Image (cartoon, grey):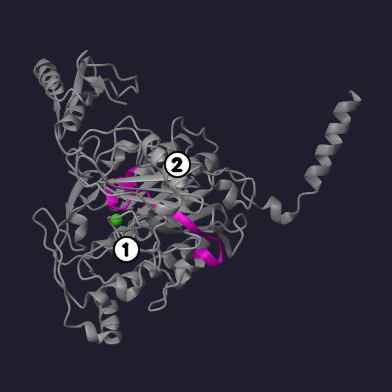
Amino acid sequence: MNQAFVVAAVALLSAVTAITPAEAAKPATRPNVIFILADDLGYGDLSCYGQNKLATPNIDRLAAEGMRFTDHYSGNTVCSPSRAVLMTGLHPGHCAIRGNGSEQTTIRLELDDFVLPELFKAAGYTTGAFGKWGLGVTSSEGRGNPLAHGFDEFYGWKSQTIAHTYYPSSVVHNGTELPLEKGTYVHDLIMDRARNFIRRAAEAKTPFFCYVPTAVPHAAMHAPKALHEKWRKKFPQFDTKIGKYGAGPGEVCPDVVNPIAGFAAMMEHLDNEVGAILDLLAELGIDENTLVMFASDNGAHLEGGHDPRFWNSTGGLRGHKRDMHEGGIRSPLLARWPGTIKAGSTSDHLSAFWDVLPTMAELTGQPTPANIDGISFLPTLRGNPDQPQHDYLYWEFHKGPKPFSRAVRRSQWKAYQERGKPLELYDLEADPFEEHDLAGDKPELVGRMEAILVEARRPQGDQHDGPLFCSTLLRFTRRRKDHPVVDVGEGHLHPDRLERQRARCIGHGRQHPAVGLRWGITGGRLPHVPLDAGPVLRD
Ligand SMILES: [Ca+2]
């Protein structure tokens, strides 16, 4: 035995014996992850972020026993594009989904996107999603279904617009639509399923990723009756106010007497359920091996009779859902992982939804996918000061074919631009509520921000009309034996119709020469190949 080996062996032995019992008890690999995504919850809606008209003691436990981020951002300012960013790790200048749209065609992830649940699958996790998917019809075959993107189990609303009511006529479990009795408050069934999933995975000793995209507190302001009555007594002055909203298609969306009380009751209910999840982790003995995160998909809303001004739902930040001011995109982010994340800690690390995928890659020991925009914030969670930083964060939001509003955050500086209007510039350190536009005083900085607005994005065709329809329409999605099957929205195209559709796609490409078409075999994750020399292949 050579001397160097002996020295190394002794050093290793010393290192092993130096480990304290507390360190030895730390889980070494593959922690469970629970990601609770609130819907339209504002930066100021949690008491740990300053809410003082209602309390969220259980959600606050995530902050008291973990880390609270002050400068975290949603993926976009409305549901679908924000969720697409969370799934893909691409910021809104690169992510294909940049606005809400048709659940049949425009807001579905691509089958060859490598997305968050697939990352967990690659790491050997069991995966479940419970609530509002927001990226397609969950009972459909193919791209709209969360099971096509790496989830082992899905239980929740059939579609994003049906999730506007908490009393839908059906719920979807693993692609199958199940009728519900009239008056069933589906949110409770969903949360039960989420807890059942956690329990089953823990008892099977399988690491799990449990994604809980709850619809709370999105309109309609439907809350459990007893809690709603409790809050009506506290705020009787709003009993004359009726919250109206709609859900579709063909769904009943009851009016809400006193939607102010409805909001408080929804929040209390969600808070209790987060508490129930934390109690379950303790009961199952997996507290110290489970990372629980909580965030919101966009800022506070103004719908269904909700009054974010009464609640100070944005915490004073300017703007709401659907715009790019801070109140539309800044999100709470809480992360609790006892024994690893320092209890009661706060971080001002500049981060956004596109950072979640690489964070989870690092957490699970998986390679970070190439060409994504996120940066892992696991060092911050672990208290490691060696945290790589973004040069900037970028967003764009589409209400139609072109970006409607855009924003850049770079250190304390915020650039904001609505279509057709001059760029505005704010110093968030001195002016957190974006009240003083400094664009006229800082031409050099404005120039840099304008350059970022150009460099940060790839052009995108109109996601609401033909070109994307073509890209949806004419793609091989899988091969069944020797028969290529082409995704045509909700159905499949057999080989004898292929030529007709191919010709139609070429024709469409010639009518729209400025936009690209995608064409390729995606079931086997092969590269896309051009359909025709005419259309430009879109990345
Ligand atoms: Ca939302």
Label disc, if present, on residue 409 of the rendered structure: none
Q: Amino acid at mark 2?
A: Arg
- The residue carrying pointer 1 sits among few (fewer than 14), some (14 to 19) or many (20 or more) residues within 10 Å by Cα, namely many
Residue 288 location, quadrant: bottom right
Q: Amino acid at mark 1?
A: Ala
Tags 1 and 2 touching, CB below 8 Å: no
Q: Is residue 430 above or below residue 227?
A: above
* SS category of the residue bearing label 2: helix
Q: Quadrant of the C terminus?
A: top left
Which of these two is toward me, 492 or 406? 406
* SS category of the residue bearing label 1: loop
Q: Quadrant of the N terminus?
A: top right
The reply to whether residue 535 is in sight is: yes
Image quarter for ligand 1 equals bottom left
Residue displayed at 58% across by 59% down: 338
Give the residue at mark 1. Answer: 300
Residue 17 at what x, y percent from top left?
Answer: 81, 47
Give the residue at mark 2. Answer: 448
Residue 144 location, quadrant: top left
**Does the segment drawn in magenta span residue 73?**
yes
User: If you read the primary sequence from the N terminus, does the residue marked by circle 1 or circle 2 appear first?
Assistant: 1
Chain part drawn in magenta? 62-84
Residue displayed at 19% across by 15% down: 534
Kindly tell me whether mark 2's CB lies below 8 Å from ligand 1: no
The reply to whether residue 90 is in sight is: no
Residue 127 at what x, y percent from top left?
Answer: 40, 44
Q: Is residue 36 above or below residue 145?
A: below
Q: CA distance from mark 1 to mark 2?
A: 30 Å
Residue 476 at what x, y percent from top left?
Answer: 23, 22
Name the side, left or right, on which 433 lies relative to 359: left
**Does the segment drawn in magenta span residue 206?**
no
